[in-house]
Amino acid sequence: MTVSPPRDAGPTPARHAYPPAPRSGGVDLVHGRPVADPYRWLENPQDPATVTWSAAQDLLYAEEEARWPGREALRRRITTLLAGGGSGPPVPRGAREFHLHREPGHEVAVLAVREGARTRVLLDPLVADPSGKTVLDAWEPSWEGDLVAVQLSSGGTEQSVLRVLDTATGEVVDGPVDRVRRSPVAWLPGGRAFYYVRRLPPEETPGGAGRHRRVYLHTVGTPAGRDTEIFGAGRPETQYYTVATSPDGRLLVVGASEGTAPRTDLWTADLTRTEPARPELRRFQHGTDARTAVRLRPGGGPLLLRTTAGAPRGRIAAARPDATGPGHWRTVVGEQPGTVLQDFAVLDGPALDRPLLVVVRTRHAVGEMTLHDARTGVLTGVVTLPGRGTVTKLTVRQDPGHEVWFAYTDHITPTVVLRYDATTGRLGPWPGGPPAVSPAEGVRVTQEVVRSRDGTEVRMFVMSPEGRPDRPRPAVLSGYGGFGASMTPGFTPQAVPWVRAGGVYAVACVRGGGEEGEEWHRAGRREHKHNTFDDFDAAADHLLGTGWAAPGRLGLLGSSNGGLLAAAALTRRPEAYAAVVCAAPLLDMVRYELSGMGASWRDEYGSAEDPADFARLLSYSPYHRVREGARYPAVLLAVFDGDTRVDPAHARKMCAALQWAGSGDGPVVLRTERGVGHGTRGASRSARLYADVMAFLAHHLGLDPTRDVLG
């Protein structure tokens, strides 16, 4: 229900002249409570009024940007840090090793294949689109390595199109198949067919939204319209599916989850009993409040699982393919206090005395790697990593072997691909990857313990020149706190020049993330979301109270859900910060479900359709907490017009509200980047975004970004 709109109030007198933005929206009556939405007209990017307003905001941003003298110096420095290229761990298939690779100075990653000592490019997105707007979203080689399914999208939309390439020639032999979005691809032996996930055509879905998904079997070389539907009929549009097959083609596993909910339902099918087009799916895990992933190996033996069932920090279990739930699973490697299970792989080659499990855990977000007897789970060894960093997903051969590959990175070390040989116990660089790069000089990383409002211990990484709070410095605090995602150490190119110029850069591991397991996630979601914000406030207070940060020179930086976190902190305590940056942020939490991928996030935030959830969402929704006359600090809102996850309308509405309400000295500006989206982008665009953000913060926190203590 909508009642009469408020009067068109003029802007509060301020030091900045902003483009006019009439407060013409109505007041919705939600569960009996009036909710003003004066800038709803900015939700429509095609509306002439929105187009005019956005163009004026572009001009305002350009004027402000010109006042940041260190921006170009930062861009050059960050470009250099990103110029070294990089590679992902190889996916072995037969005698070939497939991997993502970005040559030094190259704009985007290419799909490469290594055969013996020779590496060649199989797919370069820049060849298909020299503008750089097309990126490789996903890829999956067939079990034999003769074919590879690739998914590309353009303009940042992540609306992928799938094609199949011949590995030997690079020629397209199948596709295009549209309406996929980073779909899993599960090949059958021989490369004749694969299972995948595709959205229904809009005309076949209620309201024409086209969000309903199905699992299909596709035969290579035939039109996608002839694909056989395997799974998904009658299920909600917010369901997401996974699909996997064993290398020998004996087993099919289908998974379903409700949006981003921390629960997985699983089905298995024995493909030796039926045709692949008619698998008999049996419930393997259903209605269990746990995440479970399956490691499929050839040979028809027990399945090995990574699961939170009965173990919020994760355990490895074994089960028969026809088992019906966790009660029929056997624990192989149990939950370990203080750590969170991230991944595992099986090494069972003939050169080994016994089969091994390579297990990756994190302890307070820092990676660890151990070896265990695959039959008993007994600890047999520890793999020493290069530092206190992050281990990415493990890859192994589909046939029995003794090698495992992974990528390693930390806050000051670019990603390097490593190979562990269980026959020798040696860990070293993978020959197919780029040369290892030394950690950035002049930056020291420590981990602090912060006490939140309720006494909970929260970890925070701090990057600084001395590794201790020698004197109060301009400081930036970042965080995420959602969806069980962990802020593990990763190369942070924007932090290196900041610290070398004399600043402090901190990353808080607040509740809502996964740094301390599933219970940590649930302690910061839905009705517990206030814990996320309390933890972030405590991290900011810790930086100030212990002398890391200088009073009046503390800034915030957050992206996506982290943008919500930074904006919530801004509206809770605007006086505590000198500058705030929110990139691709969620800001209108009353209407977040109605755009982008918001409907799939209800399990994380709650739904405004529920009265209790609505009251909580409204209580912290940054857009609705903007108050006329408040002295807000300088604010930069960065959005991307191709973003299909978080609608840029969130930032447009917040920008107009802050410009209307604020009386502070700092400007409120909107940076709109076109032709990109929420995810992957080219190296030069990344460098430009990082430079703009850090130059804005430097300008308002009083740091000279052109200064370099080592330069």
Image (tube, rainbow, N blue to C red):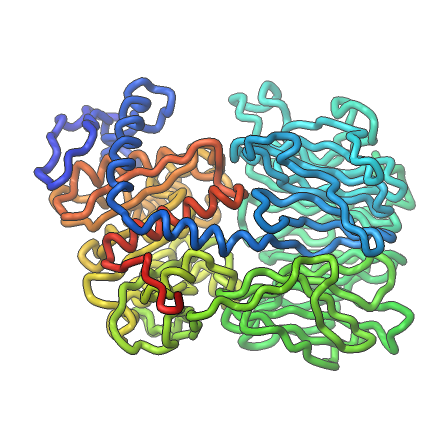
User: Is there any visible trace of residue 180 in the rendered image?
Assistant: no
**Does residue 684 sit above or below 411 in this rendering?**
above
Counting the numbered discs, the total is 0
- Residue displayed at 31% across by 28% down: 54
Q: Determine the residue located farthest toward the front in the rendered image.
A: 711
Q: Position of residue 159 (x, y in %)?
A: 58, 32
Quick one: 543 or 438, which is closer to the camera? 438
Q: Where is residue 471 in the image (x, y as percent from the top left)?
A: 26, 75
- Residue displayed at 34% across by 61% down: 477
Quick one: 196 or 160, which is closer to the camera? 160
Left or right: 580 in relation to 389: left
**Does residue 49 sit above or below 392 in this rendering?**
above
**Does residue 352 sit above or below 536 in this rendering?**
below
Determine which quarter of the picture holds residue 609. top left
- Residue displayed at 74% across by 56% down: 324
Quick one: 654 or 17, which is closer to the camera? 17
Left or right: 440 in relation to 372: left
Please state, as top left, top right, bottom left or bottom right, where the N terminus lies in the image: top left
Left or right: 255 in relation to 66: right
Q: Determine the residue located farthest toward the left in the rendered image.
A: 13
Q: Where is residue 490 in the image (x, y as percent from the top left)?
A: 52, 61
Please state, as top left, top right, bottom left or bottom right, where the C terminus lies in the image: bottom left
- Residue displayed at 31% across by 51% down: 70
User: Is there any visible trace of residue 6 in the rendered image?
Assistant: yes
Left or right: 555 in relation to 130: left
Quick one: 679 or 284, which is closer to the camera? 679
Q: Where is residue 486 in the image (x, y as percent from the top left)?
A: 50, 61
